Amino acid sequence: MKQEMTGAEIVLQSLVDQGVEVVFGYPGGAVLPIYDTLFKQNSIKHVLVRQEGGAIHAAEGYARSTGKVGVVLVTSGPGATNVVTGLTDAMMDSIPIVCITGQVPQHLIGSDAFQECDTTGITRPCTKHNYLVKDPNKLSPVFHEAFTIAQDGRPGPVLIDIPKDVQFAKGNYVEKEKIIIPSHRLFEPEIFKHDDKINEVVDLISKAKKPIFYIGGGCINSGPKASELVAKFVEITGAPATMTLMGLGVIGSSHPNSLGMLGMHGMYEANMAMHECDVMINIGARFDDRVTGRLDAFSPNSKKIHIDIDESNINKTIKVDVPVVGDVTNVLNKIIKTWKDKKLKTNSSDLKLWWDKINKWKKIDCLNFSNDEKEIKPQYAIQRLYELTKDKKTFITTEVGQHQMWAAQFYKFEKPNRWLTSGGLGTMGYGFPAAIGAQVANPDALVIDIAGDASILMNIQEMSTAVQYRLPVKIFILNNEYMGMVRQWQELLHGGRYSESYTDSLPDFVKLAESYKAVGLRAKKPEELDDVINEMISTDKTVIADIWVSKEENCFPMIQSGSAHNEMVLSKDQKQDKSSAEKGKILV
Amino acid sequence: MNKSVYDSPDTTAVSKRHILTVLVDNEPGVLARVIGMFSGRGYNIDSLNVAEVSNDEHLSRITIVTEGTSEVVNQIEKQLLRIVPVHSVSNLDEEGSAVEAEVALVNIDLNDSNKKKIYEVCDFYRARKIENENNSIIFEIAGASERINRFIKEVNQITKIEIVRSGPVAISTYKNAKED
């Protein structure tokens, strides 16, 4: 028998039915009926943030660290517009999110009512799909479809806008098992109709002399099994593997075949190997411009295999030879099976020559930096943080900028879902709320936001949230008083004119932490660093560790914009040639 | 035209006209999703036509004329397929045999001196006069866009006119063309 309940009750019942445990949100006029229903139940926990932008990044952190859908609940108007950045971030990085927004009652829509905005209109380009639900009977089908779409195929954010009168009105609830979603609305993998593609892939790899795996965030989205399969296939072939920023952790840093991260601030050996390879196997990456560098010089002599769940990524920027559209887990299962059935092998003497070459590039030691006895080098700070936290269940989140790249270079990830960063959109202010979300999902884990002094201020208000819910999140600030990456670009490309990139009047981060009743620590000298890190780890409270680092340190190696993989700049002294620097200046 | 921030290695491809026909669920916002994808990703729409084609299943057909290299149009098709309510996308140009037609309504400034000539042109192009309450001289012409272009050009040389055009719709000529 169908049950009649209010729209708000249907919303809550749908969330329960979908297995939702936590909602990140902020109340307001147009969602009061849902908050009222929330008050009367115990199955869903609500985490009150201090700005809606924090809610959606927290939901992203929750989703990325667990593989589950992150749920956000905000009000109409400013509540909805404040989540736009987070929705775009989740869209770019393929994070499953369901965002519920209140809307003014239907009879007021279009009248410029108080806190009214065209939420579905504003969020259309930054969601996978969105809904304005006008009938309480349609609420449960919409919710169940939304959760499916958010996770199906290439994951992404879905928004549901609910007018206040619909939240009050009575309607029927339909269980998720009874909802049939038409197949065209979901991801339909075409590939497995053609086995010849898989044959082509394995033949190409087995004949390769200089193969390389180029592994992206899609492997993480495909689930933990995918990472295992990728590692297994890399081992079977014996080929080197490099990972994108979003793909770190798919193959452990300590894995002998891992070359670490590639791209703009990636490893020299990874970029050189990408440039010189003869067969490139892209698994779940999208040839992002931070990865490819100049397109006309991108891996000029290779046959390219591209495994991606999103068909629009095929041939979008880089033309590939063998596209395979499908989920990494399915495709790799098939590839490994075919490889074994055909008893294929890579040529070990060819591979040895290839590894010899790669090992020569490794000897360059591209992450080398000159440590200092007086000042804490930011790279050294991350190295120590890694050494002192590597044996714990640690999640690292970051903001965006130099500290993010140093974290990616110097923190070694061994497992997927432990590294949470804003890759595609590059959202400063992501890391701290994402850490809150990750800590909510993993109460027993050590969650550290590696931050910069500028980025952390973008969502510093979430200190209240962390303290209120007793979340022992650690904020590890590499404080150089600059917007470091902006300053670096100004130094390299704009004649050292540091226009507006110095952050004057920074707060005293220790006192700031204390004012929120959290713990503030500070390290000014290298010899203080380990003690501060250890104290930070052992404190069972929200901690801000303010690490004073060298002010004008640059992040190297670097492919300057407009350059190719084999034109990496390894240090400040090695100047890029003028003409390509001029060309690169207009790029982002 | 490549969509990366970096120069494209591929500059030789030729740009040409393509007719895309997109079958969608007729639900609120679906047209905005489709045209928003075009503007958001920097593609052009030369003409756009949309109408419900199946009442009981709530399906609409959107016909879009666009111009681009085959790489660009291929990317447009893939991006359209990502939109949740989109059932199918066909590039009628690529499939070869398709027929297309559009309708134009032309309000003609008629007087005694040009009357004969204009009626001759209209007769030749089989444009049909539409009676109306204000006794304006309005002709309707249907057919291939090229033919309508020629008609408009000829009438325009004679007198002042006002035109509305539907933009082409097109259908595949294959028997039992399957949708999805």
Image (tube, coloured by chain):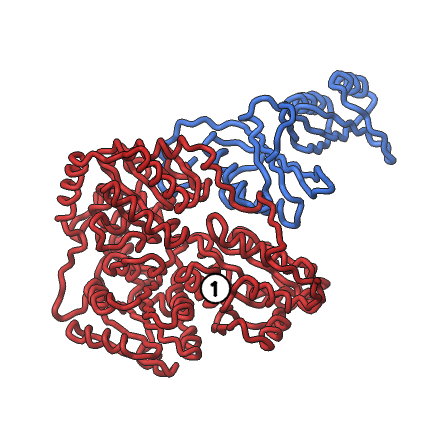
Chain colours: A red, B blue
Residue A304 percent coordinates (x, y): 33, 35
Closer to us: A458 or A424: A424
Which residue is depicted at the point 39% across and 69% down? Answer: A442
Residue A118 percent coordinates (x, y): 61, 58
Using residue A221 as the reference point, say whether residue A121 is left or right of it.
Answer: right
Which residue is depicted at the point 60% across and 77% down? Answer: A40
Q: How many dots with numbers?
A: 1
In the rendered view, would you say A390 is above or below A366?
below
Residue B46 percent coordinates (x, y): 58, 34
Residue type of the residue flagged with mark 1: Ile
Disc 1 secondary structure class? helix
Residue B176 percent coordinates (x, y): 65, 26
Of all chains, the one bearing label 1 is A
Using residue A568 as the reference point, say whether residue A144 is left or right of it.
Answer: right
Residue beneath label 1, please?
A56
Using residue A563 as the reference point, say whether residue B102 is left or right of it.
Answer: right
Q: Quadrant of residue A62?
A: bottom left
Closer to us: A202 or A96: A202
Q: Quadrant of residue A3?
A: bottom right
In the rendered view, would you say B35 is above or below A101?
above
Closer to us: A116 or A448: A448
Which residue is depicted at the point 37% across and 65% down? Answer: A431
In the rendered view, would you say B81 is above or below A538?
above
